[in-house]
Amino acid sequence: MALSDQEIGERIKTARQICHLTQNQFAAKIHVLQQTLSRYENGINAVPNNTLEHIAKELNISLTYFLGVSSDEYSDEEILLIDLYRKADDRIKKYIFELVKLLMMA
């Protein structure tokens, strides 16, 4: 199922916020104006394919997350967390795992 421009924009915004980037910071990274990024995130303008590829690369997230190509078994947030976890180094993975275990026991 193809995602709408608004759904793609929401995923871009969520991923950007998880990476603690403002629109201005991220727009500069992907070489667009802040207003253009805002239009993408709000679904006003469609994101060109090459720009979407650049966004995925800059956020270190699989392009498939932004295109909605995923299993129905997982929520969008779960897919994003899995993607980010897989890209982390071993030290960070160990820390995340221990943190989740600790939180689950609380």
Image (spheres, rainbow, N blue to C red):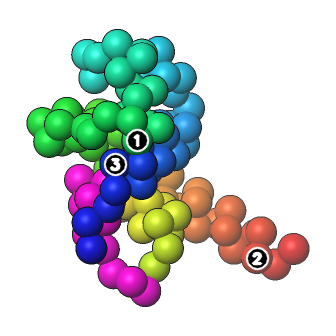
Based on the picture, tell me whether residue 40 belongs to the magenta stretch: no
Q: Which residue is mark 2?
A: 104
The residue pinned by badge 3 equals: 5
Q: Nearer the viewer, mark 2 or mark 1?
A: 1
Q: Is residue 20 left or right of residue 6?
A: right
Sequence-first tag of 3 and 2: 3
Q: Where in the figure is residue 52, as x and y percent of width and height?
A: 23, 40
Q: In terms of secondary structure, where does tag 1 sit?
A: loop
User: Disc 3 versus disc 2: distance between alpha carbons?
Assistant: 36 Å
Secondary structure at badge 2 equals helix
Please rate how many residues cluster around mark 3, counting C-alpha atoms within 10 Å: few if below 14, some from 14 to 19, many from 20: some
For the question of whether residue 79 can be seen, the reply is yes
Q: Which mark is residue 43?
A: 1
Which residue is situated farthest in the bottom direction here?
A: 73
Identified by mark 2, the residue type is Met
Query: Which label lies toward us, 3 or 2?
Result: 3
**Given contact means CB atoms under 8 Å apart, are the residues at marks 3 and 2 in contact?**
no
Mark 3 or mark 1: which comes first in sequence? 3
Task: Categorize mark 2 by other alpha carbons within 10 Å: few (<14), some (14-19), many (20+).
Answer: few
* Residue at screen point 44% across, 60% down: 80
Residue 21: x %, y % from top left: 51, 27
Amino acid type at image mark 3: Asp
- Could you tell me if the residues under marks 3 and 1 are in contact, i.e. CB atoms within 8 Å? yes
Instruction: Describe the element under mark 3 as helix, strand or loop.
Output: helix
Q: Quadrant of the C terminus?
A: bottom right
Q: What's the magenta region?
A: 63-73
Estimate the x, y position of residue 14 in percent, counting from the top left: 51, 46
